[in-house]
Amino acid sequence: MAIVSIGLVMVAGLVLEHIGLSLVGDEADLAPVVFHFSPPDERRPVSDLRFVDGDGRATSLADFRGRVVLLNLWATWCVPCRHEMPALDRLQAKLGGADFVVLPLSIDRGGLPPVKRFYAELGLKALGIFAAESDAPMTQLKTPAIPTTLQIDREGREMARQFGAAAWDSPAAIAMLRQALD
């Protein structure tokens, strides 16, 4: 029964979104980034998640070792995710490079096709496309909901966690992320 109720809420949210209304406001209403930091001596390795890239090639979180990673778990049907993705795209365009990457990991069961349509619809250009094709990463990372974002250090350990959509390209968020790159 609970699954049916959650499904109805998601469908209602998507219908409202489609006709120009929203349950969560628009991108201008995104919350500030409020990381829940792990003290350096308590940082634990993040599970080596497995997923595919936009070309369907198998990859894993370990492939990003040596870079600071902002791992965002999301889905195309998640209304707050829809509002957050443009900010993540702008963040990747601004900070992405050899030392830092925004890794948006979709948990859509439909795999790459709905994710590619979503990127085209929103005009996302800077973000890479990555899909887990299941919600297994939520279990592996012990996260109760999406969007959830983890900041992962160069050694693959969780530095911080953010629950919910946020304004990732705000000056405060950028300053916080730059500190992790120093």
Image: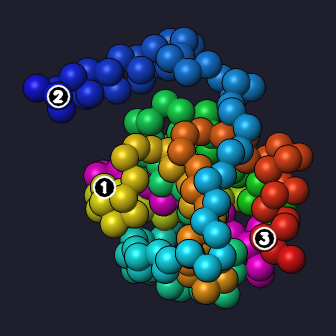
Magenta range: 96-111
Sequence-wise, which precedes: disc 3 or disc 2?
Answer: 2
Q: What residue did someone put label 3 on?
A: 180
Q: Badge 3: few (under 14), some or many (20 or more) residues near its Cα, within 10 Å? A: some
Q: Are marks 1 and 3 in contact (CB under 8 Å)?
A: no
Q: Secondary structure at mark 3?
A: helix
Tell me the distance, in whole angstroms, between the alpha carbons under discs 1 and 3.
28 Å
The residue at which mark 1 appears reads as 135
Amino acid under disc 3: Ala
Q: In the shown orientation, is residue 132 left or right of residue 21? A: left
Residue where numbered disc 2 is placed? 2
Residue at the image point whose x is 69% and y is 69% from the top: 101
Mark 1 surroundings within 10 Å by alpha-carbon count, few (fewer than 14), some (14 through 19), many (20 or more): some
Residue 108 within the magenta-colored segment of the rendering: yes
- Residue sitting nearer the eye, 133 or 74: 74
Q: CA distance from mark 2 to mark 1?
A: 17 Å
